[in-house]
Amino acid sequence: MDLTYLLETHGDATVVAVLGLLVGLVFGVAAQRSDFCLRAAAIEFWRGQPGSRMAVWLLVFGVAFTGTQALFWAGALDAGSIRQLSTPGTLSGAVIGGLMFGVGMVLARGCASRLLVLSATGNGRALVAGLVLTVAAQASLTGVLSPLRGSLSALAIVPAEMRDLSLLIPHWVGVLAGTCFIVSAIGLAWRTHLSLTQFVMGCGVGCAILLGWGATAYVASQSFDIIPVQSITFTGPSADTLSVLIVQPNVTPNFGLGLVPGVFVGSFIAAIVSGTFKIQSFTQETPLPRYLTGAVLMGFGSMLAGGCAVGAGVTGGSLMALTAWVALLSMWIGAGVADTVMDRPRSTAPMSGIRQSVPETSSGPVPADGLVASPN
Amino acid sequence: MEEGLTAGAISAAFGFGGGLLLGLTARLASFCTLAAIEDLFFGHSRRRLRMWATALAISMACVAALDAIGSVDFSRSLYHRIELNPLAWVVGGVMFGFGMALCGTCAYGTLARIGGGDLRALFGFFVLALSAYMAVSGPTAELRIALISPASLGNSITERTLPDALGLGSGGSLIISMIAVVALLAWSFASPNFRASPKHIIGAVAVGAAIVSGWIGTGWAAVDPFDPIPVSSHTYSYPLGQTLLYLMTSSNTELQFGVGATAGVVCGAFLGALWKREFRWEGAEDEKDMRRHILGAFLMGTGGVYAGGCTIGQGLTAASLLMISTPVVMASICLGVWLGLTHLMGGGLINAIFQRQG
């Protein structure tokens, strides 16, 4: 299969879009079957109960990180053609946006990619939240929210040289660090009896990200046009896809435009084949206001932070981009705060040694912590 | 641009003001087009229908006056420029009416509900806006062009109002308007029930004032030969799509009348809900509820564009110009509402049809 022939016959843009579709299919299938979810992993972490979801996330991050750093080490990827490493970025955006995104994903029970994957399995809540997220993201990029985004971003800008941490930390160290992630993921997976399917699929998610880098880098090297070297991220492409539906039927295809439908179809197929397709909607326990708030926070936060949980967290993180790491950390913290405030079940006092403090003037006995333990 | 507001911004301001009135009336005087249509079918009380009739009468009278004075050139209105297509009026109207029944309110009512805190309505707004935009420049537009446009009479016909179609001059047009105004007012005020209700009368006046303010805003205040904007007034199908687009791309798009109007209705309804202490965050009750709302919103968004206006757009704004499309669209909407209500109440349209024949 001669790439140059394909590029000449169909045009670079179409080829890249088709590649996006294929990468999306891989991601969709793998993410649906592995239940890959940053929110679930962060919640397990903050509740002190690292489990299978955290194992999957560590695996995905480890595979993506190791592989991407290996690609850099081998010279297959070049920082100059990658946006997150070659253009100025915003630290204030990464922090504030990351925090907002983290809170939002706990409120909406899923990050942007998880919502997309879930909506393809019949989950109406995820579809609604995903739509609102996309509109909020577009509004933050070019709409009524963009002035606010601009001023928050401008608080702390970093130049391109500072973003590329590989200038400080050589790529082989990155490969080593990534391998450590993978090893700890395997350890955790073993301890939590992660199923082999989920393990393999988790690797698959990481590989999808590598495929994205590889495919776009290869096309960029073969093409005369400037093709951005990129990999999986969701909020920008989702907003583009929405625009295509309503505003410009004749927009130029790109990687993201193929990615979003690809993930949707991949997840759908995986759900049907595995029998996990199920129509779900809003109920009393899953209130619409909370979901909508979460979706708006994620839409705005991801645009501010330069990507969503996958886009900034995994894809950006695998590049050793400073702003991406800061964003990921902020998302992690934001999720923890939101979970603690909103959802965390309380445990009985004596186990953790916490007692309610008694005012000095009281003469009665120390009251027991009257809260009852509830199942997680 | 530093010297003053653009035509778009001025018209948006007028739209906002009129929208505020419409939103307040929705909540404080319970102005609701679905309720008015239900009055028509099941009416023990025809009060909401009379509100509509009074508002229409006021709008017609003011339009006739403005036309006579010459401040607004109504022959440049949006309704004179869009494609004339009776099939589109019928199909669009029935779709819109059916969607109204499914949602329990029309597009304008959806905005009023958002002002009251109903988040199903907020989601309904997204679906409405997307469907309306798609019906103009997306997949459903292709469908419209393929299936419905063949019946089009084109847009070169300029005699689109009732008096023009009958070949009457401006004098005859004025007389027809006066007859219509008097008839509507006489019918409305014939009811002691309506006469005794200042709330409904004031509401009707407010609605009429809103429609007229739209004509004045776009047809007189915002007229700029270098920056022409369509002469129109309140309608809530395509403008919802414009509003969504504005929310998403405001750094690159201009304000328009419809965007101001949409915002105005939501704000007015919000203020009205606060006043009556009715504001309350509300979500969906169950999956069926949500599905019905989504389908209904889609039908309204698409049907409203096909028909060239919603219940407000055709039933008040276009009607105030005595457009020939209005009776056809409104009859189709009523048919759609009837079909929708039958479907909801009878447990299925098919059952209802076969029961009748049986």
Image (cartoon, coloured by chain):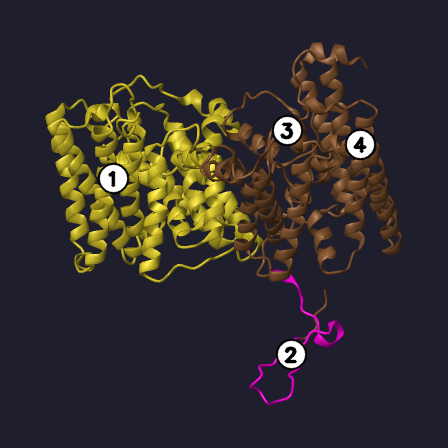
Residue at the spot 32% in from the left edge and 49% down from the top edge: B268
* Residue mark closest to the camera, 3 vs 2: 3
Alpha-carbon span between mark 4 and mark 1: 68 Å
Is A354 magenta? The answer is yes
Query: Badge 1, how many Cα within 10 Å: few under 14, some, many 20+?
Result: many
* Image: B121 above or below A240: below
Residue ID for mark 4 = A170
Disc 4 marks a residue whose amino acid type is Pro
Q: Which residues are magenta?
A: A342-371
Q: CA distance from mark 3 to mark 4?
A: 17 Å
Question: Hey, what amino acid is under mark 1?
Answer: Ile
Report if residue B349 is visible in the image. no
Location of the N terminus of chain B by quadrant is top left
Q: Nearer the viewer, residue A129 or B143?
A: A129
State the image coordinates of residue B8 (x, y, percent, origin top left): 31, 29
Is B126 part of what is drawn in magenta?
Answer: no
Tags 1 and 2 on a common chain = no
